[in-house]
Image (tube, rainbow, N blue to C red):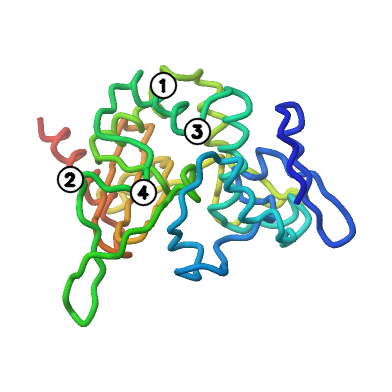
Amino acid sequence: MVYNAGWRDLPDTTFRIGSSSKAVTTRQAMNHTAGVRDYGICLCFPIWEYYNRSYYETQRETLGIVEGSDLLFVPGERFFYTSYGYNITGAVIESVTGKGFNDYLKDSVFVPLGLDGIRVDSGTPRATDAVFYELANGRFKPVFQVDNSNKLPSGGILATPSDLVRLGQQMIAPTLFSSDTRDQLVRRQFLADGEPNPQGYALGWRTGETQLLRGTITTPVYHHHGVAYGAVSHFSVYPQIGMVVSVMMNKNQGDFDGVPAQLVDLFVTGLQSD
C-alpha cells in the first residue's frame, strides 16, 4: 500500500493489488468496502494484532500495520467489515486538521458536548476505570492489559453510557454538524454494481428498522455493536421517537440481542402511561 500524506491525496490513497493499483476513498474506508484486511498475526507477543501491546503515536503510524498487505478485492466491489479501515479515516482527520486524532476528538467533540467521562485509550488504565474481565473455567478473571492505540477510531475510545447517550443526541438534533451531514452519515451505502451492502451499513452506522411494543410500532434505528478485549457495547439511536440507548458490559463478548429494544419499550410504555 502506498499512502500519500498530503490532504488532497488522502481520499484517493493508493493501495496495490498484485501488479495493479486501485484508488481507495475515505467513504469506502468508512463503509467497509475498501478491501482492507482485518486483524491478523504479527511477529510479536501476543501474535494476534487484536491483542496489541504496542503504542502508536498517530493514525498515520498505524497504517504501517496493513501497508504491506494486498487489498482483499477491488475497492467498492464487496463489503468486508474491518476495524483497520477506520485507521485511514483517522489519518485523514489528522492530515486535514493538523491535529493528532486524540486532540481533535477532545477539542471538537468531547469538550463542546461536555463529555467528562470519555477519552481516547492511552494504554495505561486509570484507578477510576472499570476492570475488564473474561470468563475462564466458570470464573471471572481480569484480562491482560492491551493497548488500543492501533485501532483508536474503531475501538479505542473509553466512555460511560451517559456520555454516549449525549453523543447519540447529535444524530437526532445535531449541533456539532449540519443536519445534511447527519443525513449523509446514516444514508445506506451501495456496492459498485448498485447492490446494497449486506449489513445496511452507512458511514459508521448500521441503519434499518426495528419493532417495538410487541410489534405495534415500527421505527427507524441507527446502531452499532462494539467489542474490545474484556468489554462489549451496544449503541442505538431511535430518531423518530427521540431516544438513545447505550448498553455496556465490562466482560468479554456477551449476548445483548434484544436488550436495547426492551429498554426502549420500557421508556415508551412509561411515556404512554403519563
Q: Secondary structure at mark 4?
A: loop
Q: Residues at badges 2 and 3 in contact (C-beta under 8 Å)?
A: no
- Answer with the quarter of the image where residue 111 lies: top left
The residue carrying pointer 3 sits among few (fewer than 14), some (14 to 19) or many (20 or more) residues within 10 Å by Cα, namely: many
Looking at the image, residue 96 lies above or below residue 53: above
Q: Position of residue 38 (x, y in %)?
A: 58, 60
Say which of 51 and 274 sits in front. Answer: 51
> Residue at label 4?
123
**Which residue, as the protein is rendered here, is positioned at the far right?**
19
Q: Position of residue 217 (x, y in %)?
A: 33, 44
> Residue at label 3?
101
Say which of 237 and 211 sits in front. Answer: 237
The three-letter amino acid code for the residue at tag 1 is: Asp
Q: Is residue 85 left or right of residue 238?
A: right
Indicate which disc residue 107 carries.
Answer: 1
Cα–Cα span, label 2 and label 4: 13 Å
> Residue at label 2?
127
Mark 4 / mark 1, whichever is N-terminal: 1
Mark 3 / mark 4, whichever is N-terminal: 3
Looking at the image, residue 70 lies above or below residue 208: below
Q: Residues at badges 3 and 4 in contact (C-beta under 8 Å)?
A: no
**Residue at 70%, 27% in the rendered image:** 7
